[in-house]
Image (cartoon, helix red, strand yellow):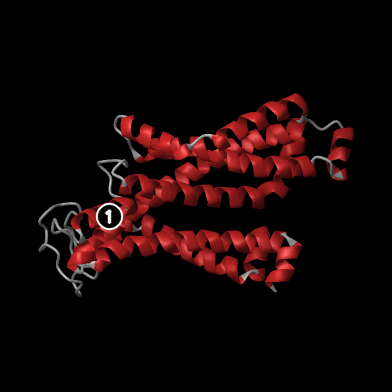
Amino acid sequence: MAFLQVWRESSKFRIGMVITALLVAAALLHSPLTRLAIGDIDPLANGSFGIFEDPSWDHPLGTDRYGRDVLGLIFVGLPNSLGTAAIGGAISTIIGVIVGFIAGYKGGVIDAVLRTFTDMMLVIPTLPLLFILARYVRHLTIPTLALILAVFSWPFSARVIRSQVLSLRERPYVELSKITNMSDREIIIQDILPNMLPYIGIGFAISSVGAAFALVGLTILGLGPSDTIDLGAIIYFAQSWGVLSLGKYAILFAPIILLILMFLGVAMIQIGMEEFYNPRLRGAGR
C-alpha cells in the first residue's frame, strides 16, 4: 500500500522506478538481449568482428580493439555492475539495520559502544584500504568485492536508522506495547520496523549506488576483478585504447551514460520517497 501511495503522489518516484526497472530488466535479460544483438557469438571472444568498426545497424555501438561488439559487452557488464550494487547494498543495509536497531532501541552502554564503533568506522580512510584489499585479495570476485565494499559502507545506514529508532521508541504506542508485556523482538518487528521501511529502503538505494561507483572506480584503476567484465572495465579499456583520440566515442560514453542513469534512477526514487514521507519537503516540492 505504501508503495502505491508513493507511486501515485510522486512523479519523481515514478520516473526513478521506471529508469531503475528498465536497467534491472536489461540486466536480467542480458542473455537473450546479447543473442539478439550479436547472435550466438560469444561476446567476450576476440576477433569475432572487425577492429574498431564504426556504429552501424549490425553494431549499434561499434566494436572494440579486440573485435568484440560493444553493445554485447554492455549487456554482459551491466548485470555484473548491478549485481555488485545489489549485493553490496543488501549486506551494508543488513549490518546497518542490526547495529542501528540495537543501538537505538537498547540505548545506554550498548548504544554508546555501538555509536563509538560506528563513528570509528566513519573516520577510517576507506579509499586507501579498498585499494590495498583489492590489490592483495586473491581471486577477487564480484561477491567478494561486494562484501569488502559493504564492510566500509554500513555506518551511514546505521547512524540514520539509530536516530530514527531513538525517536520511535519514545512514541506512545511503543510504551503501550511495553506495558502489555510484549517482548523487545515483538515491539521491534510489529511497531518500529514498519515505520522504518522507507528509511531502510533509502539506505539500501544509497549503499547500492555507492557500491556500484566504487566498483567502477576500482576497475578503472585496474584493481577490479580481472576475469569479469563490468561497466568500469569497459571504461578502463576505452581509456587505455585512447578511443577519444580515435573518434570511437561510443565505447567510452555508453557505459558512462548507463552509470548516470543508474544514479539518476536511484536519486529520483530517494527524492520521491523523502518528499512523500517528509511533509516539509512534500510542500516545498509542490
| Foreground pick, 285 / 20 | 285
Q: Position of residue 195 (x, y in %)?
A: 72, 49
Residue 252 visible somewhere in the drawing? yes
Residue 230's x, y, as percent?
Answer: 32, 51
* Side of 267 relative to 260 (left or right): right
- Position of the N terminus, as image quadrant, is bottom right
Q: Is residue 1 visible?
A: no
Instruction: Name the residue located 48 percent from the left edge and 49 percent from the top edge.
Output: 210
Which residue is drawn at the image coordinates 50% and 45% (left, top)? Answer: 89
Give me the residue at 71% from left, 26% from top: 110
**Residue 50 sits in quarter:** bottom left
Residue tagged by mark 1? 234
Query: Which residue is painted at 38% across and 62% down in the image?
Result: 258
87 left or right of 138 in image: right
Tell me where residue 9 sits by quadrant.
Answer: bottom right
Which amino acid does the dot numbered 1 rest on? Ile
In this view, 250 is above or below 137: below
Whole-percent x and y of residue 51?
A: 11, 62
Neighbourhood count class around disc 1 (C-alpha, 10 Å): few under 14, some 14–19, many 20 upward: many
